[in-house]
Image (cartoon, grey):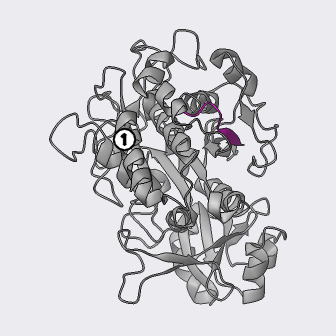
């Protein structure tokens, strides 16, 4: 069983892990842990401590919590394996045997959210361009110029994206990142799911700067080429925090598009177990996601393809399939509609597990676009809807950095301007509705004039 182990070593070790200029190893942090085989390929990651307001609940997802990476506050994650037949014993013994072990958490498999079913495309990406009012966005100076947009997926094939867009785009190799063991250069991966996602981000934000993070290419025993481990997403988010903090505070912006999630409780601890991921706001990845939002990043997750009418065959949660970070209150959870505005049958419905009001909204999917899976195959699933929405967020960030409009304020603006598709206000099929660019532009104009 593969797990994430949270430790609180001495402050100087924590400081070394948190310093992007230094590289600590698992052995530096943990030494030997009884019954655990540490993974030396996984670079330890610092986890911030939530610091609530004076009367706040530190684990509440709705209160204004801050995050401290100070050496006396933060903890450190390492990755390791515990024998399956000894897992329950070891999990109970580790904190008792080592005072610096503060938690043992699930490291579940994460997988792409490509669609089930084989329906033909509904419209093409130019229809999506029209529905997103891309010309009006560009006329307002909102084209994503200079905005870093990270695509966490299976890697990008830049030549394929440029060919099917009919133009070049910017990919920042220097700020891209590979998990340990993943070879290949940014923008030069095989055409696939990540290439589709990259293409779809550029519909609304054609001048955004893409950051290639092939987190789903990490290899594990018995794994496929399109699934990875949550621990690699933890490490990717740690890298992206450094990307964010490397920007001037007054112009800081970073959009993170995640078209993946956990489909099965098989890889998780049971709900209620302290190491659980799906329902546990205290899981280190869920804390790191919240800390990125707090620092000024816009984090988007696909809602998933476990809708009642057309469930992906991998969906194994019996109910409430929007789990873990995909259901976090501090991310934008994105469902899918076709170019006619109708919800696609595979788009996961709420309530979410960490926050009941999920998905937040819907964006367009199931259209002919990147042709990453063949000329007659659509860009589909909430996998396509998420980067479409991420592109709109990146477009807004062209002139509205986090210092001017916080991620929380932008999420609220997108919800308030979304076009209702069923009951008035929020519902668990469409969230607050379908993204409405013209509504967003009108709201931004009013804010500029205030």
Q: What secondary structure is found at the residue carrying circle 1?
A: helix
Give the farthest residue toward the left: 423
The residue at which mark 1 appears reads as 442
Give percent across and percent down for residue 108: 53, 54
Q: Which residue is pictured at 42% across the width and 47% down the height? A: 444
Residue 325 seen in render: yes
Q: Nearer the viewer, residue 87 or 215?
A: 215
Give percent across and percent down for residue 398: 59, 44
Q: Is residue 41 left or right of residue 110?
A: right
Above/below status of 151 relative to 166: below
Q: Which residue is pictured at 49% across the width and 31% down the height? A: 384
Above/below status of 362 relative to 67: above
Residue 259 seen in render: no
Confirm whether the magenta stretch covers residue 449. Answer: no
Q: Is residue 201 left or right of residue 190?
A: left
Q: Which residue is pictured at 38% across the width and 68% down the height? A: 61
Above/below status of 283 relative to 165: below
Q: Nearer the viewer, residue 320 or 448?
A: 448
Q: Please tell me how crowded label 1 is: few (under 14), some (14-19), or many (20+) other residues with Cα within 10 Å.
A: few
Q: How many badges with numbers are in the image?
A: 1
**Quadrant in which residue 144 is drawn:** top right
Give percent across and percent down for residue 88: 50, 71
The stretch of residues the image draws in magenta is 204-212
Give percent across and percent down for residue 241: 66, 62
């Amino acid at each position: 069983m593969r797990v994430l182990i949270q430790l609180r070593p001495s402050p100087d070790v924590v400081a070394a892990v948190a310093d992007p200029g230094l590289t600590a190893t698992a052995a530096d942090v943990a030494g030997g842990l009884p019954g655990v085989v540490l993974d030396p390929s996984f670079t330890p990651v610092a986890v911030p401590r939530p610091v609530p307001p004076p009367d706040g609940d530190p684990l509440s997802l709705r209160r204004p919590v801050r995050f401290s990476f100070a050496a006396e506050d933060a903890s450190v994650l390492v990755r390791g394996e515990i024998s399956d037949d000894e897992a329950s014993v070891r999990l109970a013994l580790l904190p008792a045997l080592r005072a610096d072990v503060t938690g043992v958490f699930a490291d579940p498999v994460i997988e792409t959210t490509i669609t089930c079913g084989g329906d033909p495309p509904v419209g093409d990406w130019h229809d999506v361009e029209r529905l997103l009012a891309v010309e009006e966005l560009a006329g307002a100076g909102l084209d994503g110029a200079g905005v870093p947009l990270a695509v966490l997926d299976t890697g990008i094939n830049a030549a394929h994206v440029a060919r099917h867009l009919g133009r070049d785009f910017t990919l920042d190799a220097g700020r891209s990142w590979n998990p340990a063991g993943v070879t290949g250069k940014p923008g030069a991966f095989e055409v696939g799911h990540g290439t589709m996602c990259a293409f779809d981000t550029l519909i609304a934000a054609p001048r955004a700067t893409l950051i290639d993070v092939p987190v789903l290419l990490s290899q594990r025993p018995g794994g496929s080429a399109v699934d990875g481990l949550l621990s690699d997403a933890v490490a990717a988010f740690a890298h992206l925090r450094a990307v964010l903090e490397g920007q001037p505070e007054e112009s800081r912006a970073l959009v993170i598009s995640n078209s993946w999630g956990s489909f099965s409780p098989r890889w998780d601890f049971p709900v209620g177990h302290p190491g659980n991921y799906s329902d546990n706001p205290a899981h280190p990845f869920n804390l790191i996601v919240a800390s990125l939002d707090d620092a000024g990043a816009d984090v988007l997750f696909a809602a998933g393809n476990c809708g009642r009418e057309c469930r992906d065959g991998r969906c194994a949660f019996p109910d409430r399939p929007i789990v873990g970070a995909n259901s976090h209150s501090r991310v934008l959870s994105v469902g899918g509609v076709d170019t006619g505005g109708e919800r696609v049958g595979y788009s996961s419905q709420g309530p979410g597990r960490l926050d009941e009001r999920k998905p937040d909204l819907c964006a367009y999917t199931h259209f002919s676009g990147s042709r990453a899976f063949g000329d007659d195959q659509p860009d589909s699933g909430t996998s396509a809807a998420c980067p479409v929405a991420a592109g709109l967020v990146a477009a807004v960030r062209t002139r509205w950095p986090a210092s001017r409009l916080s991620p929380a304020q932008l999420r609220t603006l997108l919800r308030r301007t979304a076009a209702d598709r069923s009951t008035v206000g929020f519902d668990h099929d469409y969230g607050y509705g379908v993204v409405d660019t013209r509504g967003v532009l009108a709201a931004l104009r009013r804010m500029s004039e205030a």
